Image (tube, rainbow, N blue to C red):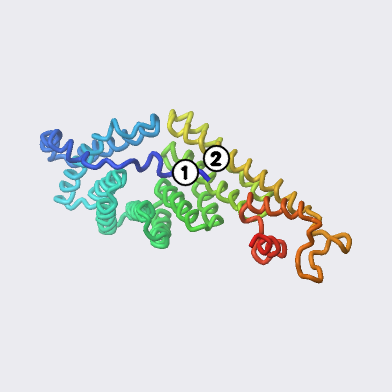
């Protein structure tokens, strides 16, 4: 299958922006210093800059022109964080730390992001805010997966995050935890669990207060269905694969319509690309189905008279059916995985190919 960009991560974490914060540091130092007495205003401004950057990326696909926004936001949020700590406002300090972690993640600075998420989690515990604890754990899980770490560790983070988000009653945090837990289960090959998580996420996606939640929900559930359809690479449950492709297409179409309604042109293009993946998978599965049909109907394995039997007194295949044998060999090379280990046909063809 074509290398895919994760729908959840597209528009949520972007290309590396090494040096952006340093580039804008001097330019904005005076502005931050003048507003340093009001950490709440700095925090609001910094969060707004991050939101503007993400929104622009979703609409246009441009991930570079607003990069300086992230540097300015980092400076403002750092100042607000220090201001909140000075007054022991741990809950507000947590939000600044969480957003600083998101900025570092967008810049692919994994260690810095983890430090911020760890700090945010500790502060959220002090503030007794389960929602912020959940958000910090989801951030840690994302970093674990993005940098190729342990999927088990990521899964543990997300299990706890789901419990905390449920306790917080914040539907956005619960949606994000369920959605990302689904992606981890896909990576682990547990498609049943991934699908269950996405069904739960989509059921509450309209209650998150974020119009983009259903968009990402449909994209990510469609990805689960597409993974199910890939099972026909090595299994012959073609009806299951056909149904999975039908469901994937339906979810991609839903995502496409939502992206269009939101004006997220970059996401529209992404959804079109995923629909193309589904079409390509459908064509491949149809080819495999035809190939298997030819293979399964070969009279070599359905003997009707004595001359069709494979075994002779000299323990070698009869040369009278070489045309059928060549067809079987060609199909087995064309469709890897068509022959299951332990199957009599597989043993015969493997022996013949040595």
- The structure residue drawn at horizontal position 19% and vertical position 45%, both measured from the top left corner, is 78
**In this rendering, position of residue 269 left or right of residue 18:** right
Furthest residue to the right?
Answer: 305
- Where is residue 183? Give x, y as percent: 46, 51
Residue 278 visible in the displayed image: yes
Q: Quadrant of residue 107?
A: top left
Kindly report the distance in space between the C-alpha atoms of the residues bearing marks 2 and 1.
9 Å
| Local crowd size for mark 1, using a 10 Å CA cut-off: few (<14), some (14–19), many (≥20) | few
x, y (%) of residue 167?
40, 56
Q: Tell me the element at label 2.
A: helix
Residue 192: numbered disc: none
Quadrant in which the C terminus appears? bottom right
User: In the image, what residue occupies the spot 57% across and 47% down?
Assistant: 225
- For label 2, the residue is 277
Residue underneath mark 1: 4
What residue is drawn where x is 86% and y is 62%? 307
Work out whether mark 2 precedes mark 1 in sequence or the reverse, and give the earlier one: 1
Few, some or many residues within 10 Å of mark 2 (<14, 14–19, 20+): some
The mark total stands at: 2
**Residue toward you, 15 or 152:** 15
Contact between marks 2 and 1 (CB within 8 A): the answer is yes
Pick the front one: 101 or 80: 101
Quadrant hosting residue 343: bottom right
Q: Give 200 or 271, whichever is nearer the viewer.
A: 271
- In the displayed structure image, the side of residue 259 where residue 354 appears, left or right: right
Q: Position of residue 87 (x, y in %)?
A: 15, 50
**Label 1: which secondary element:** loop
In the picture as drawn, the residue positioned furthest to the bottom comes out as 313
Percent position (x, y) of residue 97? Answer: 25, 49
Work out whether residue 110 or residue 207 is closer to the camera in this orientation and state it.
110
């Amino acid at each position: 299958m074509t290398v895919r960009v994760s729908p959840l991560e597209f528009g949520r974490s972007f290309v590396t922006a090494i040096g952006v914060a340093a580039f804008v540091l001097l330019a904005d130092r005076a502005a931050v210093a003048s507003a340093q007495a009001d950490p709440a205003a700095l925090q609001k401004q910094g969060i707004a800059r991050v939101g503007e950057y993400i929104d622009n990326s979703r609409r246009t696909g441009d991930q570079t022109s607003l990069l300086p926004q992230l540097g300015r936001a980092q400076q403002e949020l750092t100042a607000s964080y220090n201001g909140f700590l000075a007054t022991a406002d741990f809950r507000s300090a947590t939000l600044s730390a969480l957003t600083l972690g998101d900025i570092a993640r967008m810049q692919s600075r994994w260690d810095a992001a983890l430090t911020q998420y760890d700090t945010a989690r500790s502060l959220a515990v002090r503030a007794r805010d389960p929602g912020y604890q959940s958000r910090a754990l989801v951030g840690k899980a994302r970093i674990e997966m993005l940098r190729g770490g342990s999927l088990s560790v990521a899964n543990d983070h997300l299990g706890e995050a789901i419990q905390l988000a449920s306790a917080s009653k914040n539907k956005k945090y619960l949606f994000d935890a369920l959605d990302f837990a689904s992606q981890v289960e896909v990576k682990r090959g547990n498609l049943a669990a991934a699908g269950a998580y996405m069904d739960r996420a989509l059921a509450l996606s309209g209650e998150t207060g974020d119009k983009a939640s259903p968009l990402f929900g449909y994209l990510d559930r469609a990805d689960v269905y597409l993974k199910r359809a890939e099972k026909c690479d090595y299994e012959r449950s073609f009806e299951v694969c056909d149904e999975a492709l039908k469901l994937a297409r339906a979810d991609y179409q839903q995502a496409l319509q939502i992206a269009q309604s939101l004006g997220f042109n970059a996401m529209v293009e992404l959804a079109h690309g995923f629909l193309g993946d589904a079409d390509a998978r459908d064509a491949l599965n149809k080819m495999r189905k035809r190939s298997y049909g030819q293979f399964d109907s070969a009279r070599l394995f359905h003997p009707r008279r004595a001359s069709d039997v494979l075994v002779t007194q000299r323990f070698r295949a009869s040369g009278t059916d070489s045309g059928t044998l060549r067809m079987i060999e060609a199909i087995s090379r064309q469709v890897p995985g068509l022959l299951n280990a332990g199957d009599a046909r597989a043993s015969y063809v493997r022996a013949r190919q040595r």
